Amino acid sequence: MRVNDTDGRAILDRLKALEPSIVDSTAKLLQRKGVVAVLPAIPLVINPLAVARAKIVSLQAALNSLEDAAQKAAPASLQAESVALRGRLDNNMNAVIAAYSS
């Protein structure tokens, strides 16, 4: 269900307000990948890098759900802006997932 322009703007503005936090968090995850990678694995029990990657993938799924809902609700006048925001957030998350996958 699409919302009107005023409500759509309010939703998009709130999502945009989250963008700096998401960008900052993904940057920190990228910076800390080296630390996670050198943590000792416990054979047959836990691999810290795999656990971190699984949590990041879960976070991306939650973000995708939020983006999907916001994009479906956005009125036509805000679709381009919504798609652009989604692209920026997805690029950040994809970079982190790629780093933790290597």
Image: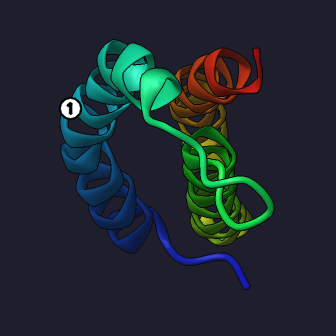
- Give the SS element for disc 1: helix
Residue 83 position within the rendered picture, expressed as x and y whole percent measured from the top left: 66, 34
Residue 6 position within the rendered picture, expressed as x and y whole percent measured from the top left: 33, 66
Q: Is residue 30 left or right of residue 97?
A: left
Q: Is residue 55 left or right of residue 13?
A: right
Q: How many numbered marks, from 0 up?
A: 1
Quarter occupied by the C terminus: top right
Q: Is residue 21 left or right of residue 60?
A: left
Q: Can residue 75 be seen at all in this image of the molecule?
A: no
Q: Is residue 59 above or below residue 39?
A: below
Among all residues in the image, which is located at the extreme bottom?
A: 1
Identify which residue is drawn at 56% across, 59% down.
59
Crowd tier of the residue under label 1, counting other residues whose Cα lies within 10 Å: few below 14, some 14–19, many 20 or above: few
Q: Within the image, what quadrant is residue 101 found in?
A: top right
Q: Is residue 48 left or right of residue 17?
A: right
Q: Is residue 65 above or below residue 16?
A: below
* 98 vs 88, nearest the viewer: 98
Q: Can residue 13 be seen at all in this image of the molecule?
A: yes
Residue 70 position within the rendered picture, expressed as x and y whole percent measured from the top left: 58, 65
* 54 vs 9, nearest the viewer: 54
Identify which residue is drawn at 61% across, 68% down.
62
The kind of residue on which mark 1 rests is Pro
Residue that numbered label 1 is attached to: 20
Identify which residue is drawn at 58% across, 59% down.
55
Q: Is residue 36 above or below residue 73?
A: above
Quarter occupied by the N terminus: bottom right
Q: Within the image, what quadrant is residue 94 found in?
A: top right
Residue 46 position within the rendered picture, expressed as x and y whole percent measured from the top left: 65, 60
